[in-house]
Amino acid sequence: MSRPAIVTAGPIALPRHELLARVFRTLGDATRLRLLEVLLEVGEATQSELLDRVDASQPRVSEHLNCLSWCGFIAAERQGRTVRYRVIDERAAALIGLAQTFLDDNEAAVGSCTVLDAD
C-alpha cells in the first residue's frame, strides 16, 4: 500500500483554529523539530549534513524536509547537484524558544503526560 501525498494541489479551506493546530502539528514531530533546531543552529545544511545530526533514515528526513518546506518554515535551494536547506521564517526560532521556556517550567508535567503518547 502506498503512502498518501503529504500535500494537496491547493490549499484546503479550514477555520483559523484548525490551521493553527496544523502549525503545532508541524512542530509536533520530534524529527521535524530537531531538523529545525539544527538549521537554526548552523544556518544552512545539506540533507547529508542533517542526516549526520538527526537520528532518522534518509527517506524519513527527506519527507520531513519536504513538509517543513511546504509549510513555509524552510527553503530548499539547489546549488549544482547539492540542495541546501535553511530556515526562511525567523519566527520559527521564536516559536521554538517560547516552547523551550514553557518546558523549563513544566518539564515534569509534560514528561508525565501519557495522553500524548496514545496517538
Image: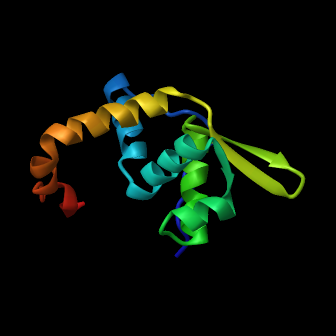
Q: Which colour scheme is used?
A: rainbow
Count the labels in the image: 0
Front-lying residue, 33 or 118: 33
Q: Where is residue 18 in the image (x, y as percent from the top left)?
A: 34, 32
Q: Position of residue 34 (x, y in %)?
A: 45, 53
> In the rendered image, is residue 7 in sight?
no
Front-lying residue, 95 or 17: 95
**In the depicted structure, whether residue 6 falls above or below residue 49:** above
> In the rendered image, is residue 97 in sight?
yes
Quadrant for the C terminus, please.
bottom left
For image coordinates 54% across by 41% down, the residue present is: 40
Q: In which quarter of the image is residue 112?
A: bottom left
Residue ranking furthest to the top: 16
**In the depicted structure, whether residue 79 falls above or below residue 18:** below
Q: Is residue 26 left or right of residue 5?
A: left
Residue ranking furthest to the right: 80
Q: In which quarter of the image is residue 10?
A: top right
Residue ranking furthest to the bottom: 1
For image coordinates 60% across by 41% down, the residue present is: 70
Q: Position of residue 94 (x, y in %)?
A: 41, 28
Front-lying residue, 37 or 16: 37
Q: In this view, does 14 lie to the left or right of 35?
A: left
**In the depicted structure, whether residue 81 falls above or below residue 13:** below
For image coordinates 54% across by 66% down, the residue present is: 60
For image coordinates 55% across by 71% down, the residue present is: 2
